[in-house]
Image (cartoon, helix red, strand yellow):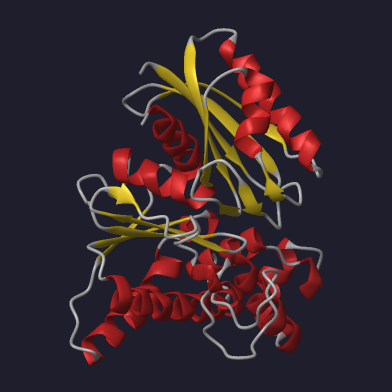
């Protein structure tokens, strides 16, 4: 198959690009994500048709946030994109653009991109964990995506790590993403800044001077400047992340973990405490550890992976 288009559908933006068989993006565009299902489908179609004007495209892959059915056609549930519930996205999009369409979970698409062309190239047994607003994930075993019986495997963010813990948008309580995500990082920093404002001087200055004005990027910036509150927030986040990776190792025993998502851009601020916890738990359990690497395709991983899945 020749060129395909990959579309990464997020809660705030939609990234679309024309991709060749080597994973090279030849053309791309970005648009805002509408708030309703009909508007989202229409914007995706417009993006695809815009890119097709200058390229001969044979298929389209959509990476969508949410639970995707095993048929790679239906969005069973998505809390953040178009309020989709039982959305027949493949059929809707094929009717709008007149090309074959494959629908995949966005984390699965990103993982596939990393396995085919990025940090996990050469590995066949991989667990990808995306640390962003929430926590996404994907499992590749034997060189194939593992989707589970209902198509929604690989959602580690919704493992319950604290019984009756913090409420999660999924409807449960105590999910891992409430403690090891970008949202958790911001919460840790705000709580500490409220209790120790004198120690959070650098952090507060990056926002509006109040704990409520602290945003995720502020925490990373302040931590790089040595802000003690921000550094403590990253240590707490990394500890929770490392514990979760150890739990996943006990069940899946992957050869490699790929850590992606926006928070992974913080590099050692996140990885050092995560690896300390991860390796400490494994040593106590006499288990071999997986290689832990940071995703290399960045925000292009979902786009590239979705395009390649459409090809296959």
Quadrant of residue 219 within the rendered picture: bottom right
- Lateral position of residue 83 relative to residue 293, left or right: right
**How far across and down, in percent of the image, does residue 292 sit?**
30, 63
User: In percent of the image, x 19 and y 82: which residue is there?
Assistant: 287
Query: Measured along the vertical axis of the image, is residue 160 above or below residue 71?
Result: below
Query: Measured along the vertical axis of the image, is residue 181 above or below residue 67?
Result: below
Q: Nearer the viewer, residue 220 or 136?
A: 136
Query: Measured along the vertical axis of the image, is residue 179 above or below residue 5?
Result: below
**How far across and down, in percent of the image, does residue 52 sit?**
57, 13
User: In percent of the image, x 65 and y 29: which residue is there?
Assistant: 93
Query: Looking at the rendering, in which quadrant would you find the C terminus?
Result: top left
User: In percent of the image, x 24 and y 92: which residue is there?
Assistant: 284
Q: Nearer the viewer, residue 12 or 190?
A: 12
Q: Is residue 40 visible?
A: yes
Q: Is residue 30 visible?
A: no
**How far across and down, in percent of the image, does residue 67 sit?**
58, 55
Q: Nearer the viewer, residue 138 or 19?
A: 138
**How far across and down, in percent of the image, does residue 75 sit?**
62, 48
Quadrant of residue 92 within the rendered picture: top right
Q: Nearer the viewer, residue 109 or 202?
A: 109
Query: Measured along the vertical axis of the image, is residue 45 above or below residue 304?
Result: above
Query: Looking at the rendering, in which quadrant would you find the N terminus?
Result: top left
The number of numbered badges drawn on the structure is 0
């Amino acid at each position: 198959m020749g060129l395909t288009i990959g579309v990464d559908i997020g809660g705030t933006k939609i990234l679309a690009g024309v991709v060749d068989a080597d994973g090279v993006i030849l053309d791309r565009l970005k648009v805002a994500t509408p708030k309703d299902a009909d508007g989202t489908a229409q914007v995706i179609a417009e993006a695809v048709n815009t890119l097709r004007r200058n390229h001969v495209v044979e298929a389209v892959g959509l990476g969508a946030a949410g639970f995707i059915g095993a048929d790679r056609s239906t969005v069973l549930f998505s809390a953040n994109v178009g309020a989709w519930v039982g959305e027949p996205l493949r059929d809707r999009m094929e009717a709008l653009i007149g090309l074959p369409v494959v629908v995949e979970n966005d984390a699965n698409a990103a993982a596939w991109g990393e396995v085919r062309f990025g940090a996990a190239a050469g590995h066949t047994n991989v667990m990808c964990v995306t640390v962003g607003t929430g926590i996404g994930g994907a499992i590749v075993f034997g060189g194939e995506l593992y989707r589970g019986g209902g198509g929604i495997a690989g959602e580690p963010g919704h493992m319950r790590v604290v019984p009756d813990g913090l409420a999660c948008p999924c409807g449960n309580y105590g999910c891992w993403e409430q403690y090891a995500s970008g949202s958790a990082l911001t919460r840790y920093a705000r709580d500490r800044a409220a209790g120790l404002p004198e120690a959070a001087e650098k952090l507060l200055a990056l926002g509006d001077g109040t704990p409520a004005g602290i945003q995720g990027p502020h925490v990373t910036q302040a931590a790089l400047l040595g802000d003690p509150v921000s550094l403590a927030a990253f240590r707490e986040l990394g500890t929770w992340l490392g514990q979760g990776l150890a739990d996943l190792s006990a069940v899946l025993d992957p050869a490699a973990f790929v850590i992606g998502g926006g928070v992974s851009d913080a590099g050692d601020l996140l990885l050092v405490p995560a690896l300390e916890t991860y390796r400490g738990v494994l040593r106590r359990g006499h288990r071999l550890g997986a290689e832990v690497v940071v995703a290399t395709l960045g925000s292009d991983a979902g786009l590239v992976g979705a395009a390649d899945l459409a090809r296959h």
